[in-house]
Image (cartoon, coloured by chain):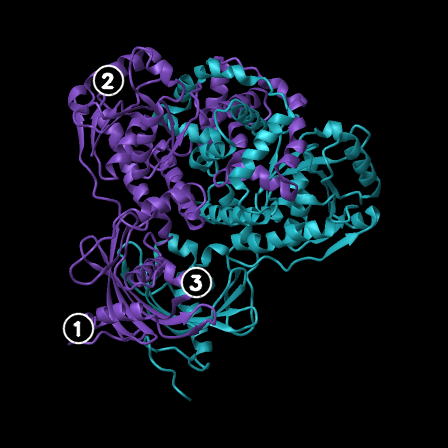
Chain colours: A purple, B cyan
Amino acid sequence: MKAAIVGGGVIGGGWAARFLLNGWDVAVFDPDPEAQRKIGEVIENARRSLPSLYDRSLPEEGQLIFHASLSDAVQGAAWIQESVPERLELKHKVLGNLTDLAQSDAVIGSSTSGFKPSELNRDGGRAIVAHPFNPVYLLPLVELVGEKSETERAANILRDIGMYPLIVRKEIEAHIADRLLEAVWRESLWLVKDGIATTAEIDEAIRMGFGLRWAQMGLFETYRVAGGEAGMKHFMAQFGPALEWPWTKLMDVPEFTEDLVDLIAGQSDTQSGHMSIRELERLRDDNLVGLLRSLKKSGSGAGGVISSHESALPHSASASLPITGDRQIPQSWTDYNGHMNEAYYLEAGAAATDRFMELIGADADYVAAGQSYFTVENHLRYLDELKEGERLIITTQVLEGEGKRMKLFHFLKNADSKLAATMETLLLHVDLNSRSSCPPGANVASRLGTFAAKHKNLPLPEGAGRYVGQRSQVG
Amino acid sequence: MKAAIVGGGVIGGGWAARFLLNGWDVAVFDPDPEAQRKIGEVIENARRSLPSLYDRSLPEEGQLIFHASLSDAVQGAAWIQESVPERLELKHKVLGNLTDLAQSDAVIGSSTSGFKPSELNRDGGRAIVAHPFNPVYLLPLVELVGEKSETERAANILRDIGMYPLIVRKEIEAHIADRLLEAVWRESLWLVKDGIATTAEIDEAIRMGFGLRWAQMGLFETYRVAGGEAGMKHFMAQFGPALEWPWTKLMDVPEFTEDLVDLIAGQSDTQSGHMSIRELERLRDDNLVGLLRSLKKSGSGAGGVISSHESALPHSASASLPITGDRQIPQSWTDYNGHMNEAYYLEAGAAATDRFMELIGADADYVAAGQSYFTVENHLRYLDELKEGERLIITTQVLEGEGKRMKLFHFLKNADSKLAATMETLLLHVDLNSRSSCPPGANVASRLGTFAAKHKNLPLPEGAGRYVGQRSQVG
């Protein structure tokens, strides 16, 4: 699959990264002589963060090509994304060219944050609005506005690359999210202009309070909970009248003077000037990866999008030992020693045990039906450091697999097949109601037995059956 | 220390929980016959979530007492918090009584979301605004408005109970955060009323996109990053003119008709009606705990507040083996088997190793100066299940502590001193520049040696020096 990115910059580069890291080939057209460097920097940021969201590896990266001609760039592209500056006459020109050059079944998306499809297509174009949010490679939201069958077709493609398409029911200037952002921006400008709060104080008012609520539930569900058992109507009866209160007086637009710009830019320097934009970007991305991985546990909001995308990613396969893990090491797994923390070797190893359980049929349905394996012992040997962003591949050898007992030996290797750790793990099969051990079901026993019989002929791995501190044996 | 809570409900109950779980005695005055049940439910929610934010235990809970008389409730209270309904004449009456009854050095805080101190104190009161955010026991933000020395005094107390006081420079209706919330609420009502989006779609537009940005950076810092190297001025030059665009036409207030209330309440039922309020509260709290624990790793925003509060919590101490861990098990540590996941036993054990390193002087400064201990092997034996919310106490015995080698044995016990797991861990002292092993500094070697000599006389723990699957020895 091929995507064409027309107009680079932060948004176009984010689109390029999102497609590329999901295995698409990406062609870029951008007359800016700096385009290659700028897009390269966005993709570099994406490479260190997007794969960290997942506990499986993403497809192999596609090819990135920069073109000097628009027609070369869009040739054969199934998705064409326009992200040129927000000037209607420029959008008309570019979208007109794209309509002529694009293959007839290509989606033509515009990243516009403000214009409606009827405005964009006034001269006969067929673009839809596909409005993403920065950083495009991490935030799932894309607002889709336009002809119904076209937005639905686009939505399916976006889901395939891990995004969350939101089809807007009626076209309106600025769609949905930017209307809300616009309202906050306007109010914030007043607060700064009137000396009520600085930019830093407004940011704290957001991220110490409702920002945390909105990352997981949004506005209405948060208020529903706040309303308590009395329900949403009760909440509105309480909060509704406040709309008529005096503070709605500031709804006009503050005059956009040079003084106001200087005031805000100066406060922003005081607040964040000690960090470069690159450092801020990485801090933001690390935070987003952490927040998203955290939401993945409950499946709320954006966390659910990642889980469902992940479950569609193929498992790696191998002819010899089964591959039970293949992933990138996220930033949040490293510690003050500058390498992967010891606890996450076990998190990765435990995930490999889970994957092996799936392979023998002791999967989520089996657990839901009341049986599982519980770990009784683990022995980890740390042989080499692993760093953030490295690929980690785990293979598993069965040492015992009879009756209630299952003893596994995980090999944790980096991309160069260098052994970074081993984990020997003993599990007992249990009944989840009585919480006591019992033999597994026939299907699980048989599939485990097959692995055990096959692996019995392999040599006992170096390090198996050893106690902590025992010296290596020669021979 | 004693706090008096005047007016229960979700906000008053949240204040009660925040003080109580930080070791304060709490006296409640609320004529509502349901007050005890309602506040009890909030405190129950807080008990399962607030301690989970920390990797140390909070102080022992204070005493909670309900009073039938206001004067009994405020007697001896250092903080008095008014959270009665948002009607000015009622606030005047209650705050007037509090001014008469309170001890002279008590802080009198009002939870008002809208009124200014000058309005609250029109009849001669001395209250400040101390406006918290729901859930009060998890979100750090408190907006403080009022006389400078009084808000500064209040800020110190709030920091002690893990909150983030934001002193507002000038009084204004609705302070800071609620002005922003109000703007979003107003715009959202238009979007629903005009059929552009449902409540569920607006929530997705928030939590799939900018909600994630705002949980960690707020508005201005996010835009600063989006502006890139060109800086905040450039960003404003791009985005500023949009303020004059057509969508600002909807800045008047939608009429608050019964139809609009029904429309929104109905959509909210469709969106969230499959979960009870209690279930939604728990989902929200689990998500918030996860997000906050995630931000704690980078120290961004609310995560920094938790780290600094945690570092002020005392370590538990013991006469025999050193206590190297004492904490509550967070929800995010449990797995599909309904108990603490095997990987988090190691996370807890690794934290105990870190704490032991601190005890022998191999602390953050020592690591920053270029030396540390790296783990080479771990052996974990899982002896009993641990559940969400249980207390976990870890003690550590030194098995070896000479030269480069340090072998520790951690005992993980629940609150009833029942052994839930053991962890045997072997570490080597390393130079962080050469990444190779070397002997520790003299101070560390000596302190480790003292522990080792003392523990040498203890019996070897059951389970030490064993390989995976080795049967227990008798005698």
Find disc 1 in the rendering and name its residue. Answer: A459
Between residue B93 and residue B404, name the one nearer to us.
B93
Give the x, y percent position of residue A29. 21, 23
**Which image quadrant is residue A303 in?**
top left
Q: How many marks?
A: 3
Spatial CA distance of label 3 from label 2 is 54 Å
Mark pair 1, 3: CA separation: 33 Å
Neighbour tally class for label 1: few under 14, some 14-19, many 20 plus, Cα within 10 Å: few
> Image check: A71 left or right of A275?
left
User: For the residue marked with disc 3, what is the amino acid?
Assistant: Asn
Judged left or right of residue B260, residue A282 is left
Looking at the picture, how far across and down is residue B440, in whole percent?
35, 64
Q: Which residue is mark 2?
A: A99
Residue at 53% across, 69% down: B414
SS for dot 1: loop
Residue for point 32% across, 51% down: A55
Mark 1 and mark 2 on one chain: yes
Instruction: Judge left or right: residue B195 versus residue A333.
Output: right
The residue where tag 3 is placed is: B337
Disc 2 crowd rating (10 Å Cα; few below 14, some 14-19, many 20+) is some
Determine whether the residue tagged by mark 3 lies in a helix, strand or loop.
loop
Horizontal and vertical percent for residue B129? 69, 35
Image coordinates of residue A144 in percent, x first then y, are 37, 27
Amino acid at dot 1: Pro
Q: What amino acid is labelled 2 in the image?
A: Thr
In this picture, is B450 found above or below A42? Answer: below
Quadrant in the rendering for residue B80? top right
